Image (cartoon, rainbow, N blue to C red):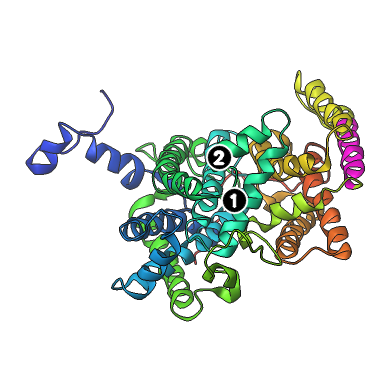
Amino acid sequence: MAGEKSVETTGLIGWIDQRFPLTSTYKKHLAEYYAPKNFNFWYFFGSLALLVLAIQIITGIFLAMNYKPDAKLAFASVEYIMREVKWGWLIRYMHSTGASMFFIVVYLHLLRGLFYGSYRKPRELVWIFGVAIFLSLMGEAFFGYLLPWGQMSYWGAQVIVNLFSTIPFIGPDLSLWIRGDFVVSDATLNRFFAFHVIAIPLVLIGLVVAHIVALHEVGSNNPDGIEIKQGPKDANGHPLDGIPFHPYYTVHDIMGVAGFLVVFAAIIFFAPEMGGYFLEANNFIPANPLQTPPHIAPVWYFTPFYTLLRATTSDFTWVLSAGALIAAVALFFKGKLSGMWRVITPVILIIIAILMKTMEAKFWGVMTMGGSVVILFFLPWLDHSPVKSIRYRPTWHKFLYGIFIVDFLILGAIGTQEPTPTLNLISQIGAVIYLGFFLLMPVWSRLGKFKPVPERITFRHH
């Protein structure tokens, strides 16, 4: 095609290029992919997420070689891996630590997108793929959580699966189908193993590829929220505010990888259980269907959403109902929604507010927990700010982001504790803050005095 640079046509590379787009793919996604030159610390976490995914897949393959997906043998096979398989303890700890590190990296990656408006036009699809990866990762972690067949993994899976029974009409049959039995049993373990090692990883890999391809199609965002493709270009048509991803950002990311691996290794060798947050004490006890642990809680990365579930009591549904009505009124009069969404969104919220008093609180707890994740898909259309980056938003916007982050951390901490009236009240306040942050975003995101965005990106040498 005219205007395109020719690729290597001699030697082994040339032979491959005639049959597979190796060189052109390398140029498009690395050597000639121009990224903004002002990437900072926050841009380490995308490449780190890829690294941890690779670690999880490789260690998972080796664990599967010795693991037995059988209710009578599963726990013993994990002990066999830890005690008898050469370097088995290291592989198991890499996998268990990697699960938690994966969520830490992904949470920080999502937070960077929230700070710099990486979900805004033209990156809506990039963000949707990213949230889909997050949901798939949650499913992967949930299915893998049962596999050690310890007390906490067994009873945690029992509680989570039972939540599906609250769905009207199909709930009981759905939970029975997920378990494959009337209780968590050998059938559950086998299907969870199949989902964990085959189904979800394939979905994850496909979504990661789609995420990267979509990102490279529209270009990377940057801390200033400026589109470098629309800025000045050099004689070759490359943006002046961009630099080739390779070698500049590959070297840049290697520094982040080195720092991450130091922390990763320190946890594996000195604190693989992390005080019971990465590996709970109860999970070193074989699963006993006849003995329920005194306190059942999910792993730390699920606890913010678990807290929202526990916070939704019968009395609290009145608060949620009133909040939905307030959000509906605010969005209708002040939301500046476009077209039919100006009517549809408030109507949906009003219907939800009415239905909240017709179904049991447990169902709305499940809906609140699920909705707190699903609402992330709609973030590109909830944020009506005239600027993308937090750098150029009003100062009080930054305080709102800070309150949201602290609220999320508090919800996570409460989820690890046994419920008390005081903690339940705090969790209900936290639920209002979490949901209000997103539902009222069309209103508050466009209020205040915004700073002027520069025509070209600001850049300081490290």
Q: Secondary structure beneath disc 2?
A: helix
State the residue at coordinates (75%, 43%): 368
Q: Are marks 2 and 1 in contact (CB under 8 Å)?
A: no
State the residue at coordinates (72%, 65%): 413
Residue type at tag 2: Ile
The quarter of the displayed image where residue 74 is located:
bottom left
Say if 44 sits above or below 194 in the image: below
Residue type at tag 1: Leu
**Residue at the outermost top position:** 340
Q: Secondary structure beneath disc 1?
A: helix
Is residue 383 visible to us here?
A: no
The crowd level at tag 1 (other Cα within 10 Å; few <14, some 14-19, many 20+) is some
Residue tagged 2: 178
What span is in magenta?
A: 316-329
The quarter of the displayed image where residue 248 is located:
bottom left
The crowd level at tag 2 (other Cα within 10 Å; few <14, some 14-19, many 20+) is some
Residue tagged 1: 110
* Residue 159 in the image, given as x and y percentages of width and height: 66, 51
Front-most of residues 344 and 157: 157
Question: Mark 2 and mark 1: span between their CA atoms?
Answer: 29 Å
Is residue 310 visible to us here?
A: yes
Please identify the dominant SS of the magenta region: helix
* Residue 371 in the image, given as x and y percentages of width and height: 71, 40
* Residue 100 in the image, given as x and y percentages of width and height: 53, 62
Quadrant in which the N terminus appears: top left
Q: Which mark is residue 201?
A: none
Count the marks: 2
Say if 333 sits above or below 422 in the image: above
Q: Is residue 322 magenta?
A: yes
Say if 348 sits above or below 120 in the image: above
Q: Is residue 138 magenta?
A: no
